[in-house]
Amino acid sequence: MISFKQRDIISIRHFNKEELLYILDMAKRMEQAEYTDILKGKVLASLFFEPSTRTRLSFESAMKRLGGMVIGFAEPGVTSVAKGESLSDSVKIIEGYCDIIVLRHYLEGSAQLAADVVKIPVINAGDGANQHPTQTFLDLYTIQKTKGTLEGLTIGFLGDMKYGRTVHSLAYALAYFGAEMYFVSPPGLRLPRDFMEALKDRKVKCHENESLLGISKRLDVIYCTRIQKERFADPVEFEKVRGIYRLTKTMLEEFGIKDDLKVLHPLPRVDEMDDSLDATDFAVYFQQARNGVPIRKALLAAVLGTIE
Ligand code: CP
């Protein structure tokens, strides 16, 4: 029997295909019915050590719409971390004030570290360039809703494969569904070799390219990503790839695409995706961002054990 009760959500690698589908089904239920008080009396601590709009606010919206309460911060400079308190000490203290922790932090492994030192569930809202599992759940949900299936799709990931944590999580999850994957990036931003090996070990058909030219017609989904400026150790290296891709409606029409192509983007976008795409049928990224609420409602309800 599948149960998420009191489980941490740290990496998409910790979930099997049935568990992924279970949360997608629960998100659908969350959209179909009003569950206004199933988290009444529960407190979520929302701890954001890095900027966020979608993840933080959709978690807070989900918690409040289910009757729960939210404490936390979006600016660690106003907490005792600014006085030198460790992450480990901070979460041990905050554990006493809440029922569940949602943590975004710039260090890879930070969510696992927090989960190791507290007894309440921890949800990873993004740890450095590593993982962003709740984004993956909403990406899968969006693909399932807009393509009608998750099975056997051909996905083109475009942009920053090296630092893009959403790519790392989503590629792993899509491997359960027999996806063929094209990773399109400049040479310096290719998918880390350990992620590539993990996909190949799972018999995923993977390709690496520097352009969508010649492959766009094969794609069911383009998953466009921002170059993650904040992860570059050397600003000179960022300048070499700044603005290297700019997805436009005209470009896709010239390159050739399937009629039912869908374009996703975890957002925020900077310059990699032109707003000429926004009014097209293949742009689903705003819908994708909205799907953050039913998915995070489902995860909170499942982890806090208020719904089966
Ligand atoms: N997709 C995403 O993680 O967006 P935010 O950084 O705004 O949370």
Image: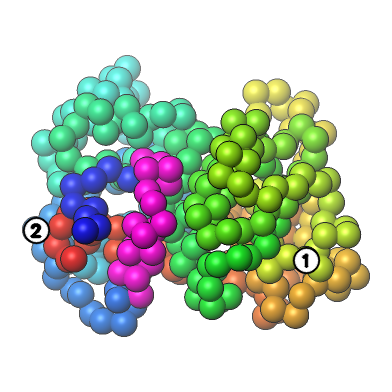
- Name the secondary structure under disc 1: helix
Q: CA distance from mark 1 to mark 2?
A: 49 Å
Please give the name of the residue rendered at 9% of the width and 58% of the height, measured from the top-left corner: 41
Residue 139 rendering spot, x and y as whole percentages: 51, 61
**Residue 41 disc label:** 2
Q: Quadrant of residue 217?
A: bottom right
Q: What is the magenta range? A: 10-28
| Residue receiving disc 1 | 218
Q: Please, what is the dominant secondary structure of the magenta stretch?
A: helix
For marks 1 and 2, the one nearer the N-term is: 2
Please give the name of the residue rendered at 31% of the width and 82% of the height, measured from the top-left corner: 32
Q: Quadrant of residue 165?
A: top right
Label 1 neighbourhood size at 10 Å, few (<14), some (14-19), many (20+)? some
Residue 301 rendering spot, x and y as whole percentages: 22, 61
Task: Tell me if residue 39 comes above or below residue 158 in the rendering.
Answer: below
Image quadrant in which the C terminus is located: bottom left
Is 157 in front, or is 110?
157
Q: Quadrant of residue 50?
A: top left
Label 2 neighbourhood size at 10 Å, few (<14), some (14-19), many (20+)? few
